[in-house]
Image: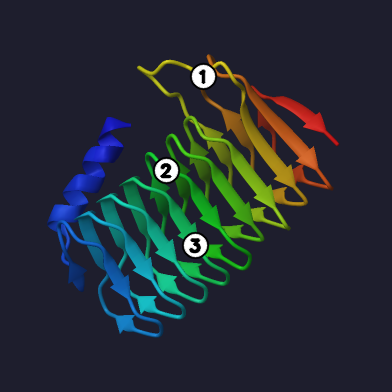
Amino acid sequence: MRKLVSFFILALVAISFAKVTLNKSIRVNAGDHFSGGCTTVNGSIVIEKDAKLEGGCKTVNGSITIYEGCSVRGIATVNGGIRVGEDADIEDDIVSVNGSISCAEGVSVNGNIESVNGAVRLQGVTVRRDITTYNGNVTLEKQCTVHDDIIVKNARHQEHHRKPLEIIIDNSVVEGDVINKDDDKEVIVYLLNGGKVNGEIRNAKVEKE
């Protein structure tokens, strides 16, 4: 997990973007088109309706909001939540360390979704690769499709939560497996309203409606 945080910070320093700032928030106006992306250290990022960024959006201390119809390469924040509006297209990964991830109907994520300490909530979303979490619950609603796996990773060197980690698959499909790699964490998978996992459910309790 430390490597993940270090990666974010190095990426913010090393990569050149169309909009760059250290201690300010960034807003991209509706319909704008940039060949790069947006990066800030201490500030939030807002991408308004139908804007298109060929690069990604990255911040260390701040939230990221992507409005409906937008297209961006990837999204990453260390300390902040991520919200993605309807019909947005994310070409790469969505990653948050300390913050929730929320995606509305029609969103397409062509990479992974990864959260360390925040909840992941998806409604009508297509995820082409994996969803991974360490400590956050995962909720899939309104006919989501995850083409690969949902993975609970081992949160080493952390105090484990007493409450079970919940994975809710409500009227949605996971084409791959649901895998709990943390033997010290209780994981419960809820299958609701026809929700299903086409692969295996490993090291987790299953409750069906």
Q: What's the residue at 58%, 42% (across, down)?
A: 149
The CA span between labels 2 and 3 is: 14 Å
Circle number at residue 99: 2
Q: Nearer the viewer, residue 158 or 108?
A: 158
For the N terminus, the image quarter is: top left
Check whether the beta carbons of the residues at disc 1 and disc 3 lie within 8 A of each other.
no
Q: Which mark is residue 84?
A: 3
x%, y% of residue 124? Answer: 66, 61
Q: Residue at x 38, y 20 (%)?
A: 156
* Amino acid residing under circle 2: Gly
Q: Is residue 89 left or right of residue 203?
A: left
Residue at disc 1, secondary structure: loop
Mark yes or no: residue 198 visible: no
From mark 1 to mark 2, how far is it between C-alphas?
A: 17 Å
Going by the image, does 40 lie left or right of 55? left
Q: Which residue is mark 1?
A: 161
- Residue 16 in which image quadrant: bottom left
Give the crowd class for mark 1: few <14, some 14-19, many >=20 residues within 10 Å. Answer: few
Could you tell me how many numbered marks the image carries?
Answer: 3
